Image (spheres, grey):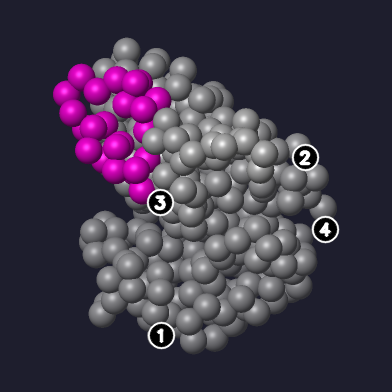
Amino acid sequence: MTVNAHRFCIAPMMDWSDRHCRYFWRLLSKQARLYTEMVTTGALIHGDRQRFLGFSPVESPVALQLGGSEPADLARCAAWAADWGYDEVNLNCGCPSDRVQSGAFGAALMAQPERVAHCIAAMREACDLPITLKHRIGIDDMESYQQLLDFIGPSASAGCRVFIVHARKAWLQGLSPKENREIPPLNYPWVYQLKRDLPELTIVINGGITSLEASAEHLQHVDGVMLGRAAYHDPWLLANADSALFGAANPLADKHDAIVHMLPYVEQELQRGTALNHITRHLLGLYQGVPGARQFRRHLSENAHRKGAGVTVLEDALNKVRQHEPDPTCTAETACG
Protein backbone atom coordinates (compact mmCIF):
# COMPACT_ATOMS: atom_id res chain seq x y z
CA MET A 1 0.00 0.00 0.00
CA THR A 2 1.32 3.46 -0.86
CA VAL A 3 2.62 5.40 2.12
CA ASN A 4 0.69 8.67 2.48
CA ALA A 5 0.56 11.59 4.88
CA HIS A 6 -2.13 9.97 6.99
CA ARG A 7 -0.51 6.57 7.45
CA PHE A 8 -0.09 7.11 11.20
CA CYS A 9 -2.00 9.80 13.11
CA ILE A 10 -2.51 10.81 16.73
CA ALA A 11 -6.08 11.79 17.47
CA PRO A 12 -7.36 15.17 18.58
CA MET A 13 -8.09 14.81 22.30
CA MET A 14 -9.75 17.51 24.37
CA ASP A 15 -7.59 18.76 27.25
CA TRP A 16 -4.72 16.53 26.12
CA SER A 17 -3.39 17.19 22.62
CA ASP A 18 -2.37 20.78 23.30
CA ARG A 19 0.78 22.38 21.89
CA HIS A 20 3.03 21.16 24.73
CA CYS A 21 1.85 17.59 24.28
CA ARG A 22 2.30 17.78 20.51
CA TYR A 23 5.86 19.10 20.90
CA PHE A 24 6.65 16.11 23.10
CA TRP A 25 5.06 13.69 20.64
CA ARG A 26 7.04 15.17 17.77
CA LEU A 27 10.26 14.33 19.60
CA LEU A 28 9.11 10.71 19.70
CA SER A 29 8.00 10.44 16.07
CA LYS A 30 9.01 12.56 13.10
CA GLN A 31 6.48 10.87 10.82
CA ALA A 32 3.20 10.87 12.77
CA ARG A 33 0.54 13.39 11.80
CA LEU A 34 -0.63 15.33 14.85
CA TYR A 35 -3.98 16.98 15.53
CA THR A 36 -4.96 19.84 17.80
CA GLU A 37 -7.71 19.61 20.34
CA MET A 38 -11.05 20.48 18.78
CA VAL A 39 -11.41 24.26 18.55
CA THR A 40 -14.87 25.70 17.96
CA THR A 41 -15.45 28.35 15.35
CA GLY A 42 -16.92 30.58 18.05
CA ALA A 43 -13.73 30.39 20.09
CA LEU A 44 -11.65 31.50 17.11
CA ILE A 45 -14.00 34.20 15.90
CA HIS A 46 -14.68 35.74 19.30
CA GLY A 47 -11.75 34.57 21.43
CA ASP A 48 -7.97 34.66 21.67
CA ARG A 49 -6.70 33.27 18.36
CA GLN A 50 -3.10 33.27 19.55
CA ARG A 51 -4.09 30.97 22.39
CA PHE A 52 -6.01 28.57 20.17
CA LEU A 53 -3.87 28.63 17.02
CA GLY A 54 -0.34 29.19 18.25
CA PHE A 55 2.04 26.26 17.82
CA SER A 56 5.69 25.51 17.18
CA PRO A 57 6.75 24.81 13.59
CA VAL A 58 8.53 21.77 15.02
CA GLU A 59 5.11 20.12 15.43
CA SER A 60 4.43 19.88 11.69
CA PRO A 61 2.79 18.06 10.10
CA VAL A 62 -0.08 19.19 12.30
CA ALA A 63 -3.79 19.60 11.59
CA LEU A 64 -6.29 21.98 13.14
CA GLN A 65 -9.54 20.28 14.11
CA LEU A 66 -12.57 22.56 13.99
CA GLY A 67 -15.97 22.20 15.58
CA GLY A 68 -18.78 24.04 13.88
CA SER A 69 -21.66 23.79 11.45
CA GLU A 70 -21.94 27.20 9.76
CA PRO A 71 -20.15 27.16 6.40
CA ALA A 72 -19.21 30.85 6.52
CA ASP A 73 -17.74 30.58 10.02
CA LEU A 74 -15.81 27.43 9.14
CA ALA A 75 -14.48 29.12 6.01
CA ARG A 76 -13.11 32.05 8.06
CA CYS A 77 -11.42 29.65 10.47
CA ALA A 78 -9.97 27.51 7.68
CA ALA A 79 -8.42 30.63 6.16
CA TRP A 80 -6.83 31.48 9.51
CA ALA A 81 -5.49 27.93 9.76
CA ALA A 82 -3.72 28.44 6.45
CA ASP A 83 -2.36 31.81 7.57
CA TRP A 84 -0.98 30.28 10.77
CA GLY A 85 0.81 27.49 8.93
CA TYR A 86 -1.26 24.39 9.60
CA ASP A 87 -1.03 21.47 7.19
CA GLU A 88 -4.68 20.40 7.24
CA VAL A 89 -8.10 21.38 8.55
CA ASN A 90 -10.26 18.63 9.99
CA LEU A 91 -13.98 18.96 10.64
CA ASN A 92 -15.29 17.17 13.71
CA CYS A 93 -18.32 15.03 12.90
CA GLY A 94 -17.71 12.48 15.61
CA CYS A 95 -17.86 14.06 19.08
CA PRO A 96 -21.08 13.08 20.89
CA SER A 97 -20.88 15.34 23.96
CA ASP A 98 -23.96 17.29 25.04
CA ARG A 99 -22.09 20.59 24.72
CA VAL A 100 -21.21 19.86 21.12
CA GLN A 101 -24.73 18.67 20.33
CA SER A 102 -26.18 21.88 21.72
CA GLY A 103 -24.10 23.71 19.14
CA ALA A 104 -25.48 21.42 16.40
CA PHE A 105 -22.10 20.09 15.41
CA GLY A 106 -19.87 17.10 16.14
CA ALA A 107 -21.52 13.70 15.68
CA ALA A 108 -24.92 15.36 15.30
CA LEU A 109 -23.79 16.51 11.85
CA MET A 110 -23.92 12.93 10.62
CA ALA A 111 -27.70 13.44 10.36
CA GLN A 112 -27.07 16.30 7.89
CA PRO A 113 -24.73 15.06 5.15
CA GLU A 114 -25.65 17.87 2.74
CA ARG A 115 -24.88 20.50 5.36
CA VAL A 116 -21.49 18.87 5.97
CA ALA A 117 -20.83 18.97 2.24
CA HIS A 118 -21.61 22.70 2.17
CA CYS A 119 -19.16 23.19 5.04
CA ILE A 120 -16.47 21.27 3.15
CA ALA A 121 -17.05 23.29 -0.02
CA ALA A 122 -16.88 26.60 1.87
CA MET A 123 -13.62 25.68 3.60
CA ARG A 124 -12.04 24.47 0.38
CA GLU A 125 -13.01 27.76 -1.28
CA ALA A 126 -11.43 29.72 1.57
CA CYS A 127 -7.99 28.06 1.59
CA ASP A 128 -5.70 25.65 -0.22
CA LEU A 129 -5.26 23.26 2.71
CA PRO A 130 -6.66 19.73 2.58
CA ILE A 131 -10.06 19.64 4.29
CA THR A 132 -10.72 16.33 6.01
CA LEU A 133 -13.51 14.73 8.03
CA LYS A 134 -13.44 12.74 11.26
CA HIS A 135 -16.69 10.90 11.93
CA ARG A 136 -18.33 7.78 13.30
CA ILE A 137 -19.78 4.87 11.35
CA GLY A 138 -23.22 6.14 12.34
CA ILE A 139 -25.36 7.72 15.03
CA ASP A 140 -28.46 6.59 16.88
CA ASP A 141 -30.69 4.61 14.52
CA MET A 142 -28.30 4.62 11.57
CA GLU A 143 -27.98 0.85 11.25
CA SER A 144 -26.85 0.19 7.70
CA TYR A 145 -23.60 0.42 5.81
CA GLN A 146 -25.49 2.20 3.03
CA GLN A 147 -26.30 5.05 5.42
CA LEU A 148 -22.57 5.44 6.07
CA LEU A 149 -21.96 5.65 2.33
CA ASP A 150 -24.78 8.18 2.06
CA PHE A 151 -23.07 10.36 4.64
CA ILE A 152 -19.68 10.22 2.94
CA GLY A 153 -20.91 10.68 -0.62
CA PRO A 154 -21.84 14.39 -0.59
CA SER A 155 -18.63 15.43 1.16
CA ALA A 156 -16.55 13.40 -1.29
CA SER A 157 -18.39 15.14 -4.13
CA ALA A 158 -17.57 18.48 -2.46
CA GLY A 159 -13.86 17.64 -2.61
CA CYS A 160 -13.06 15.94 0.69
CA ARG A 161 -10.53 13.18 -0.01
CA VAL A 162 -9.64 12.03 3.53
CA PHE A 163 -12.13 10.40 5.89
CA ILE A 164 -11.02 9.43 9.40
CA VAL A 165 -13.54 6.89 10.59
CA HIS A 166 -14.07 5.99 14.23
CA ALA A 167 -15.33 2.44 13.84
CA ARG A 168 -18.12 2.80 16.40
CA LYS A 169 -21.56 4.35 16.29
CA ALA A 170 -22.30 7.24 18.63
CA TRP A 171 -25.46 7.40 20.69
CA LEU A 172 -26.39 11.06 21.07
CA GLN A 173 -28.70 10.31 23.99
CA GLY A 174 -28.15 7.90 26.86
CA LEU A 175 -24.36 7.49 26.73
CA SER A 176 -21.62 9.79 27.99
CA PRO A 177 -18.68 10.67 25.72
CA LYS A 178 -16.57 8.14 27.66
CA GLU A 179 -19.24 5.45 27.25
CA ASN A 180 -19.47 6.29 23.54
CA ARG A 181 -15.77 5.42 23.26
CA GLU A 182 -16.27 2.03 24.89
CA ILE A 183 -19.82 0.65 24.73
CA PRO A 184 -20.87 0.74 21.05
CA PRO A 185 -19.15 -2.26 19.42
CA LEU A 186 -16.25 -1.75 17.06
CA ASN A 187 -17.01 -2.54 13.43
CA TYR A 188 -13.69 -2.58 11.58
CA PRO A 189 -15.07 -4.55 8.60
CA TRP A 190 -17.26 -1.60 7.59
CA VAL A 191 -14.21 0.69 7.48
CA TYR A 192 -12.29 -1.86 5.43
CA GLN A 193 -15.26 -2.07 3.08
CA LEU A 194 -15.21 1.70 2.60
CA LYS A 195 -11.70 1.44 1.20
CA ARG A 196 -12.72 -1.34 -1.16
CA ASP A 197 -15.81 0.55 -2.35
CA LEU A 198 -14.15 3.99 -2.49
CA PRO A 199 -10.53 3.30 -3.50
CA GLU A 200 -10.02 6.87 -4.69
CA LEU A 201 -10.46 8.18 -1.13
CA THR A 202 -7.98 8.05 1.76
CA ILE A 203 -9.59 6.04 4.55
CA VAL A 204 -8.06 6.25 8.03
CA ILE A 205 -9.31 3.91 10.76
CA ASN A 206 -9.74 4.99 14.39
CA GLY A 207 -11.11 3.40 17.55
CA GLY A 208 -9.74 0.77 19.91
CA ILE A 209 -6.25 0.69 18.35
CA THR A 210 -3.62 0.37 21.07
CA SER A 211 -0.39 -0.88 19.49
CA LEU A 212 1.88 -0.60 16.48
CA GLU A 213 1.26 -4.28 15.75
CA ALA A 214 -2.47 -3.63 15.48
CA SER A 215 -1.75 -0.54 13.38
CA ALA A 216 0.30 -2.59 10.92
CA GLU A 217 -2.52 -5.09 10.60
CA HIS A 218 -5.09 -2.37 9.87
CA LEU A 219 -2.77 -0.90 7.25
CA GLN A 220 -3.27 -4.07 5.23
CA HIS A 221 -6.84 -2.91 4.65
CA VAL A 222 -6.91 0.90 4.83
CA ASP A 223 -4.64 3.87 4.12
CA GLY A 224 -4.01 5.04 7.66
CA VAL A 225 -4.53 4.49 11.36
CA MET A 226 -5.25 6.93 14.16
CA LEU A 227 -4.35 6.21 17.77
CA GLY A 228 -5.78 8.13 20.68
CA ARG A 229 -5.59 7.48 24.39
CA ALA A 230 -3.13 4.62 24.06
CA ALA A 231 -0.56 7.07 22.69
CA TYR A 232 -1.21 9.50 25.51
CA HIS A 233 -1.01 7.01 28.37
CA ASP A 234 2.01 5.17 26.94
CA PRO A 235 3.74 7.73 24.73
CA TRP A 236 6.88 5.67 24.23
CA LEU A 237 5.02 3.46 21.76
CA LEU A 238 5.30 6.42 19.38
CA ALA A 239 9.09 6.19 19.56
CA ASN A 240 9.07 3.00 17.52
CA ALA A 241 6.47 4.13 14.98
CA ASP A 242 8.92 5.60 12.49
CA SER A 243 10.84 2.36 12.09
CA ALA A 244 7.86 0.01 12.38
CA LEU A 245 5.51 1.80 9.98
CA PHE A 246 7.72 3.99 7.80
CA GLY A 247 11.06 2.17 7.61
CA ALA A 248 12.76 5.29 9.00
CA ALA A 249 15.15 5.64 11.90
CA ASN A 250 13.63 6.20 15.31
CA PRO A 251 14.55 9.71 16.46
CA LEU A 252 15.45 9.00 20.10
CA ALA A 253 17.85 6.57 21.75
CA ASP A 254 15.88 5.96 24.92
CA LYS A 255 13.30 7.43 27.30
CA HIS A 256 15.90 9.54 29.09
CA ASP A 257 16.75 11.05 25.71
CA ALA A 258 13.14 12.26 25.43
CA ILE A 259 13.40 14.16 28.72
CA VAL A 260 16.78 15.62 27.80
CA HIS A 261 15.36 16.88 24.49
CA MET A 262 12.39 18.42 26.31
CA LEU A 263 14.53 20.49 28.68
CA PRO A 264 15.33 23.41 26.30
CA TYR A 265 11.64 23.65 25.35
CA VAL A 266 10.63 23.66 29.02
CA GLU A 267 13.14 26.41 29.81
CA GLN A 268 11.86 28.50 26.91
CA GLU A 269 8.24 28.06 27.94
CA LEU A 270 8.96 28.91 31.57
CA GLN A 271 10.52 32.17 30.40
CA ARG A 272 7.29 32.89 28.52
CA GLY A 273 5.28 32.41 31.69
CA THR A 274 4.00 28.88 31.12
CA ALA A 275 3.48 26.91 34.34
CA LEU A 276 5.70 23.84 34.54
CA ASN A 277 2.86 21.42 35.27
CA HIS A 278 1.10 22.47 32.05
CA ILE A 279 3.95 20.74 30.24
CA THR A 280 4.98 17.93 32.58
CA ARG A 281 1.44 16.53 32.91
CA HIS A 282 1.90 15.14 29.40
CA LEU A 283 5.10 13.30 30.38
CA LEU A 284 3.69 11.23 33.24
CA GLY A 285 3.22 8.08 31.17
CA LEU A 286 6.69 8.04 29.63
CA TYR A 287 8.27 5.57 32.06
CA GLN A 288 5.31 3.22 32.30
CA GLY A 289 6.54 -0.21 33.38
CA VAL A 290 10.06 1.01 34.19
CA PRO A 291 11.60 0.79 37.70
CA GLY A 292 11.32 4.23 39.24
CA ALA A 293 8.25 5.24 37.19
CA ARG A 294 6.13 5.76 40.29
CA GLN A 295 8.74 8.04 41.86
CA PHE A 296 9.03 9.95 38.57
CA ARG A 297 5.27 10.56 38.43
CA ARG A 298 5.04 11.36 42.11
CA HIS A 299 7.84 13.91 42.03
CA LEU A 300 6.27 15.74 39.10
CA SER A 301 2.75 15.56 40.55
CA GLU A 302 3.89 16.92 43.91
CA ASN A 303 6.25 19.63 42.69
CA ALA A 304 5.54 20.80 39.13
CA HIS A 305 2.46 22.77 40.16
CA ARG A 306 4.28 24.78 42.85
CA LYS A 307 4.80 28.48 42.30
CA GLY A 308 8.19 29.10 40.77
CA ALA A 309 8.74 25.45 39.83
CA GLY A 310 11.61 25.30 37.38
CA VAL A 311 13.36 22.91 35.06
CA THR A 312 15.22 21.33 37.97
CA VAL A 313 11.95 19.66 39.01
CA LEU A 314 11.97 17.70 35.75
CA GLU A 315 15.70 16.97 36.04
CA ASP A 316 15.18 15.67 39.57
CA ALA A 317 12.29 13.47 38.40
CA LEU A 318 14.57 12.00 35.72
CA ASN A 319 17.15 11.22 38.39
CA LYS A 320 14.49 9.32 40.35
CA VAL A 321 14.40 6.85 37.46
CA ARG A 322 18.15 6.78 36.93
CA GLN A 323 18.66 5.80 40.56
CA HIS A 324 16.90 2.50 39.83
CA GLU A 325 19.23 1.56 36.99
CA PRO A 326 21.93 -1.03 37.62
CA ASP A 327 25.43 0.25 38.03
CA PRO A 328 27.19 -0.54 34.70
CA THR A 329 30.52 -0.90 36.51
CA CYS A 330 29.22 -3.81 38.59
CA THR A 331 30.03 -7.33 37.42
CA ALA A 332 29.81 -10.76 38.90
CA GLU A 333 33.42 -10.37 39.98
CA THR A 334 32.95 -7.08 41.83
CA ALA A 335 31.27 -6.58 45.13
CA CYS A 336 28.71 -3.92 44.29
CA GLY A 337 26.04 -3.43 46.93
Q: Any mark on residue 13, and which?
A: 3
- Disc 2 marks a residue whose amino acid type is Ala
Q: Earlier in the sequence, mark 4 or mark 2?
A: 4
Residue 142 or residue 60, whichever sits in front? 60
Kindly identify which residue carries mark 2: 248
**CA gap, disc 4 and disc 3:** 28 Å
**CA gap, disc 3 and disc 1:** 26 Å
As drawn, is 324 to the left or to the right of 334? left
Up/down of 313 relative to 155, above or below: above
Question: Residue sitting at 44 percent across and 68 percent down?
Answer: 110
Residue 39 shows up from this direction: no
Q: Earlier in the sequence, mark 4 or mark 3?
A: 4
- Please provide the residue range marked out in magenta: 294-317
Looking at the rendered structure, the secondary structure element under dot 2 is loop
Instruction: Give the image location of residue 55, x and y in percent.
Output: 45, 27
Crowding near pointer 2: few (<14 within 10 Å), some, many (20+)?
some
Instruction: Give the image location of residue 86, x and y in percent.
Output: 53, 32
